[in-house]
Every structure is written in C-alpha cells, then in structure tokens.
Image (tube, grey):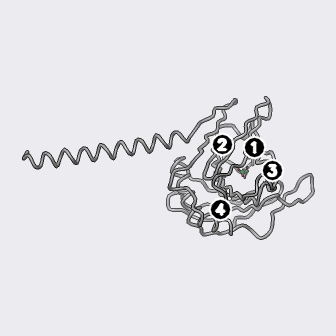
Amino acid sequence: MGKKRKILHESESSTHKQQKQQKQQKQQKQRNSEEKIELKNKSWIIYFSSLPQIIQISSTEYKTLWNLHPKERGQVRIFGKLLKTPRWQASIKGESKEGGKYGKNYRFSGEDHEPIEIKNNFLQTLHEWVCQHSGKKYNQVLVNWYNSGEDYIGKHSDDEFQLIPNSSIYSFSFLSEPGAKRDFVVTSKEHGYRKVFSLPHNSLIIMGGEMQKWYKHEVPKRSKKKCSFSRINVTFRIFQ
Ligand SMILES: O=C(O)CCC(=O)C(=O)O
C-alpha cells in the first residue's frame, strides 16, 4: 500500500471510530433517560424522562396538535349518569409508513368513541416510532388534551375487552411549559403500592405485563395556580 493511501485509510478508520463512539455515547445517554421499574404480579413500567430527538415535539407541533382538540368535551356514563369528561379526548384515525393503519373504535365507560380522521405529521412520526420500538403494529391512538391542572383523569385501569391481553400501552406527555411537570400516579389494586411519576415535557411511560390487571393509574386534579400549563397525552394501544 502506498504511504499516501495508508494515511488516508488510517484517517478514514479513525473517523469511523469517532462516529461509532459518538453513536455509542448517544445510545448510552438515551439509555440513561430510560428506567425500567419491575412491579409485583408480572407487571412493569418503562419510564423515559426524555425522548429521542426524533419524537420530541416542537412548540409549533404542540400548538398544531393542541388546536386539533374537539370542540366539545366527551361524555362518560358513570352509575347510569352521563357526565362530561374533565378533558378533551379523541380516538384518531390515520396511517403511518412503518406501522400501517390505526383508528379502531374505542369503547369505554359505556360509550363508543368513534375515531376522527386527523392528518398530523407528528402523530404519524410518533406512531412509526412506537411500532419500530415495540416491533408490533399499534392500531389504536387516543389523545387527551388537559387545559390546566383542573383537567384530569381519575384512577382507572385499561382493562378494556378490546385490548390484546398484556400488550404494552405507550403513553406520551407533552406540556406547553417545557420546565413544568404533571403527576402520574400508579396504585396497586391489592397490596398498597403507590408511586408518583413526575412527568416532564417530552416524556413517556410504557405500561407492560399484567399491569392493567393489578394496578390503576391516574393524572390527578391539581389547582390551576399550581398547574396553569396545558398538557397533551397521546396513548397507543393494540386492539383486537
Ligand atoms: O394522560 C395520561 O397520562 C393518562 C391517560 C390515560 O390513562 C388513558 O388514556 O387511559
């Protein structure tokens, strides 16, 4: 090998090494923001305190997604009474390259929630990422819009008959105020476990295993003074 070619070859391989190192550092950084919490009864949570760059929402994307909330609050039937949900909520119909179609009907609290067709690039990117990350086709997308701390979701588990048993639920949090946090509380149905996850902007909770059978989750009501910011939650599920 000529001297010049050898030097070129060496500098190419050191660039390659540097790139590999940078990639590993990036992956390590990502892993550091990801924590698996093993729970009793074959249940677990994976908590991402920050998201990979590709699925972090920009302020423009946040505003666009925020403006897509339905005009009216939804309704749920509780003990035979129809009550307004303390947030806006919609099942979304769409399609992404990697994950295919999503938009299954969602039936909960005695009401059918027909999906609405929304073409939103950010939701499509999020759907692609979830399908790639899980290696599964997620076919149900639900968005919850919380105007402030006064909007909330009560203690419940997602044990809907439509859900493929033990399939993981991906639940993303996006906030209008990047430094803020909103609580997500997990409680066991049987053994007194309670954990509060403080969810920042651009974070993710994956609920897996038998979690929906043994645990409940909620985003409790907070005063508007303490939580004046808005929040968008996007959840992905696999339905039969
Ligand atoms: O807003 C959240 O983080 C939770 C949403 C949720 O529990 C649900 O949609 O079932």
Q: Which mark sits nearer the N-terminus, 4 or 3?
A: 4
Q: Is residue 155 left or right of residue 95?
A: right
**Disc 4 versus disc 1: distance between alpha carbons?**
23 Å
Q: Amino acid at mark 3?
A: Arg
Please say if the residues under marks 2 and 4 sit with CB atoms less than 8 Å apart.
no
Q: Is residue 102 left or right of residue 226?
A: left
Please say if the residues under marks 1 and 2 sit with CB atoms less than 8 Å apart.
yes
Across and down, in percent, residue 107 comes to 76, 56
Q: Is residue 83 left or right of residue 39?
A: right
Q: Is mark 1 within 8 Å of ligand 1?
A: yes
In the rendered image, which residue does mark 1 sit on?
A: 217
Q: Which mark sits nearer the N-terminus, 3 or 2?
A: 2
Instruction: Give the mark toward the camera: 3 or 1.
Output: 3
Name the residue at 56% across, 40% down.
Answer: 34
Q: Identify which residue, 77 or 11, lies in the foreground.
A: 11
Q: Amino acid at mark 2?
A: Met
- Can you tell which quarter of the image residue 145 is in? bottom right
Q: Which mark sits nearer the N-terminus, 2 or 4?
A: 4
Q: Identify which residue, 122 or 62, lies in the foreground.
A: 62
Q: Can you tell which mark lies on residue 207? A: 2
In the rendered image, which residue does mark 3 sit on?
A: 222
Instruction: Give the mark toward the camera: 4 or 3.
Output: 3
Label 2: how many Cα within 10 Å (few below 14, some 14–19, many 20+) = many
Q: Amino acid at mark 4?
A: Gly
**Disc 3 versus disc 2: distance between alpha carbons?**
23 Å
Q: Which mark sits nearer the N-terminus, 3 or 1?
A: 1
In the rendered image, which residue does mark 4 sit on?
A: 103
What element does badge 3 sit on?
loop
